Image (tube, rainbow, N blue to C red):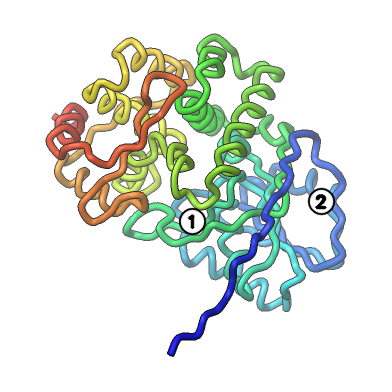
Amino acid sequence: MKVSIELKKVVDNSYDITIDTLPELTYETKVAVVTNTKVAGLHAEYLLRRLHAKELYIITLQDGEEYKNQESLETILETLFNHKFNRSSLLIAFGGGVIGDMTGFAASIYQRGIDFVQIPTTLLSQVDASVGGKTGINNKYGKNLIGAFYQPKAVYIDAHFLKTLPKREFAAGVAEIVKMAVTFNAEFFEFLETANLSDEENLKRAIRSSVETKARVVSMDEKEKGVRAALNYGHTFGHVIEMQTGYKKFLHGESVAIGMVMANRLAVRLGLLTQEQEQRIKAVLERYDLPTTYAIPDAEEFYEAFFLDKKSTDTKIKFILPRGIGNVEIVDDVSKEDVLAVLREFEAK
């Protein structure tokens, strides 16, 4: 005997990304703003002047990738339970990628799902992390291995928050901008080669181009079954670097920058990228003082860590490699010998 459950329906998860001064936001429900100590100190007043709700609560977490964990998630959830939030309540992620990922994940699992809004305050989160619905936390096995695809109801990108951004944090965001250009937009990459992103108009153009690229890719492949995986260029290597350094030595964008350099080296070895193109990409990263090397303690150990990546299987590692500049290839048939040869170039001597 077989009983079928018919669930063939289309769910519209569309939402708008507003790139402008933060507007007045009014909600006739309970709202919890999730932020961290640094962002709260710098920007809470700016947000609260524009935010109105039936009941408003602030959840302040510690700042740093090392706090993107189960304990922080429990802090968010316990606050919601203690204040009797329900399915019509709302979460607001007010911070960088760490806050956005954790808040989105909390929203996805609290009472099986409540709404959330992204107000990203770092360049990295504005151009990448806040768009697309990837949420999650880290654990000892790796980065974002616990999480869900869960789209926000809206994203508000306000360049005001970038005025207080430290140089390293700004550069970490540039790494994600470069990632978008190398994989999908050669013309945009050429702009980045000469543009000064400290200039407000150049920065606005870079943010807009990055968000438009990310939005287009997510629209084609929301759950990362195909082309969206290309946005992980630099991340396969970068996530291992983050894990090996305990999420403390490098910012996420810095690890991605090193990861792109490693991916480029592999692409050159496989004939997908020329050495001249490899150097052009590296030069743009170094213009913003991004790190481009990492002393791998043990190449074999680094290689085995790839299999904890969400895109890999038990026997195959999926690499995102540039095919020239402006194109990308997703491959899962690179020989272990080729990968190890590249890793040994970076191995600590």
Q: CA distance from mark 2 to mark 1?
A: 25 Å
Residue at image x 63%, y 47%?
A: 95
Q: Position of residue 77 (x, y in %)?
A: 60, 71
Residue at image x 58%, y 32%?
A: 213
What residue type is disc 1 on?
Lys
Which residue is the extreme one toward the front? 1
Say which residue label 1 marks. 68
Please state which of residues 316 and 77 is positioned toward the viewer in this rendering: 316
Q: Tell me the quadrant of the picture where the C terminus can be found.
A: top left
Crowding at dot 1, Cα within 10 Å, few <14 / some 14-19 / many 20+, comes out as many
Q: Tell me the quadrant of the picture where the N terminus can be found.
A: bottom left
**Res 145 quadrant in image:** bottom left
First in sequence, mark 2 or 1: give its number. Answer: 2
Q: Is residue 168 visible?
A: no
Residue at image x 44%, y 53%?
A: 66
Please state which of residues 319 and 329 is positioned toward the viewer in this rendering: 329
Say which residue label 2 marks. 48
In this rendering, the answer to whether 109 lies above or below 143 is below
Which label sits on residue 51? Answer: none
What residue type is disc 2 on?
Leu
Crowding at dot 2, Cα within 10 Å, few <14 / some 14-19 / many 20+, comes out as few
